[in-house]
Image: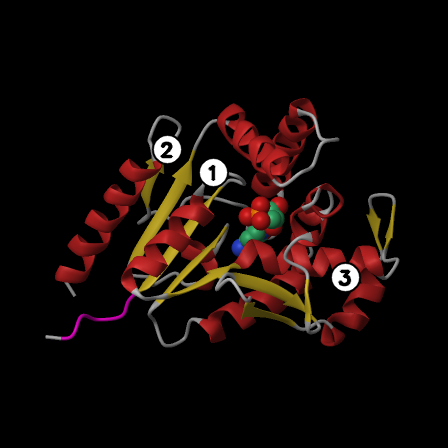
Amino acid sequence: MEKKRITIAFDGFSSSGKSTMAKTLAKRIGYAYIDTGAMYRAVTLYCLENGLFEGTTLNEEELRRRMGDIAITFAVDADGRSVTMLNGRNVEQEIRQMPVSSKVSIVAAVPFVRHALVRQQQQMGAGGGIVMDGRDIGTVVFPHAEMKVYVNASAETRARRRYDELRAKGDTTVTYEDVYKNVCERDYIDTHREETPLRRADDAVELDNSNMSIDEQNRWLIDLYNSIVEKQ
Ligand code: DC
């Protein structure tokens, strides 16, 4: 019998490793993968490039007027990797750098931005067979997802991972202290904002991967996926 193509939601703090896990699982089971953080990052890049920030103050009224001009899509590059496109331009590199990272929580806290992106995410996942990762996937975007994973790891572990990642990508200016501070600030804003703060859905399975190897995490996930799909 054909296996049911379910909806899989990954939520958790920044740099918890959930994107890598979600991507690996999607590839293994032949599902589409959507990184919703990339969508908030792309809107943030648009704001930075179009002068909508003055320091840390966002011109929300101007952004509201321009929301219809911001098209975020995903494409596959020459190496077969999924990349984020902003109005047809590949912005995958820029959205991962510190100028965007340090402002994205501000943009992600704006209700009309969240409503627009959530609607788009729901359309992208409407047919099932999707792995989506973010902060509100199991609670708001797909509250009826068959599989929900809430990934956790200590702030130190996450900062170390993001720091190593940035260094590996050739960023020689960033310090571990900067990254740690950014991780803590974003944790605070993500869990304290008024509009859908990060929280674990009641029916999500929690995974603390501070002390787990990548292989262990992947095995844990595929076991969970198999046990859920068997029951469908
Ligand atoms: O996963 P990430 O670090 O790329 O996410 C970037 C920011 O976007 C982060 O501050 C949290 C926010 N975000 C959100 O509020 N809701 C989502 N579904 C995904 C990300």
Q: Which residue is identified by label 3? A: 46
User: Which x, y percent locates residue 184?
Assistant: 61, 30
Residue 109 lies within the magenta run: no
Instruction: Identify which amino acid the numbered label 2 is placed on.
Output: Asn
Residue shown at 28%/62% (left/top)?
29
Q: In the shown orientation, is residue 132 left or right of residue 223? A: right
Residue shown at 75%/75% (left/top)?
69
Q: Which residue is identified by label 2? A: 209
**Labels 1 & 2 near each other (Cβ < 8 A):** yes
Residue shown at 29%/39% (left/top)?
215
State the extent of the magenta-drawn residues as a range.
Answer: 2-6
Residue 98 appears anywhere in the view: yes
Q: Tell me the CA gap for discs 2 and 3.
A: 33 Å
Residue shown at 62%/41% (left/top)?
169
Instruction: Identify which amino acid the numbered label 3 is placed on.
Output: Tyr
Rendered view: 118 above or below 159: below
Q: Which residue is identified by label 1? A: 16
Residue 5 lies within the magenta run: yes
**Quadrant assignment for the N terminus:** bottom left
